[in-house]
Image (cartoon, rainbow, N blue to C red):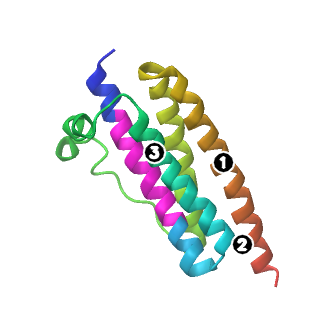
Amino acid sequence: MSRRSVVRLIDANANRALEGLRVCEDVVRFHLEHQRLYQRLRRLRHATARAVHALPVTARELVGARDSRHDLGRAASASRIRSLEHALVINLQRAKEALRVLEECARLLAPRSARIFQRLRFEVYDVEQAILLHVAALRHR
């Protein structure tokens, strides 16, 4: 196992999870204006950051493993966003996927931490359901 590769995966997916949750948080806050869902997303984002910082990896090591300039995914085309609700769905999916990668990487570096990322991923599933039910209810008004 290449520690640098695992750390690089952690760095990329921590950023992806936190960015995805932040987009969701802001859409729920400023577009849906739903206080409880906004607070849940905010807590999830902060809990994710704490879980990443608790891993046996320094911030310097995370940044040192980053190679944005040569990242094969850098030239990938971005998803087409049709609405703020669509951006919400895409970013919920992004956060779930990133948390799954963090869970798997944690199994390699800190096996006990894997359960934290698993719990966070399932919390995103739950908040996703609540958000989508809320959006559906808004559409039927």
Label of residue 135 in the image: 2
Q: Which of marks 2 and 1 is in front?
A: 1
Q: Element at badge 2?
A: helix
Please tell me in which quadrant of the rendered image residue 128 appears: bottom right
Examine the image and state in which quarter residue 34 appears.
Answer: bottom right
Which residue is at the far bottom? 141
Residue at the location (49% across, 46% down)? 48
Q: Horizontal and vertical percent for residue 66?
A: 23, 40
- Give the CA distance from mark 2 to mark 3: 29 Å
Secondary element type, mark 1: helix
| Residue 95 percent location from the top left of the image | 52, 50
Q: What amino acid is found at the position of numbered circle 1 in the picture?
A: Glu
Report if the CB atoms under discs 2 and 3 are less than 8 Å apart. Answer: no
User: Which residue carries the number 3 mark?
Assistant: 50
Q: What stretch is highlighted in magenta?
A: 9-24
> Left or right: where does residue 79 sit relative to residue 2?
right
Give the amino acid type for the residue marked by disc 3 in the picture. Arg
Magenta stretch, main secondary structure class: helix
Question: Which residue appears at 39% of the width and 40% of the height?
Answer: 53
Residue 82 seen anywhere in this rendered image of the structure: no
Estimate the spatial distance between the alpha carbons at disc 2 and disc 1, rounded to whole Å.
18 Å
Per the rendering, the mark at residue 123 is 1
Q: Please, what secondary structure does the residue beneath circle 3 have?
A: helix
Give the camera-side residue of 100 and 74.
100
Query: In the image, is residue 8 part of the stretch drawn in magenta?
Result: no
Q: Is residue 95 visible?
A: yes
From the viewer's side, name the closer residue of 110 and 69. Answer: 110
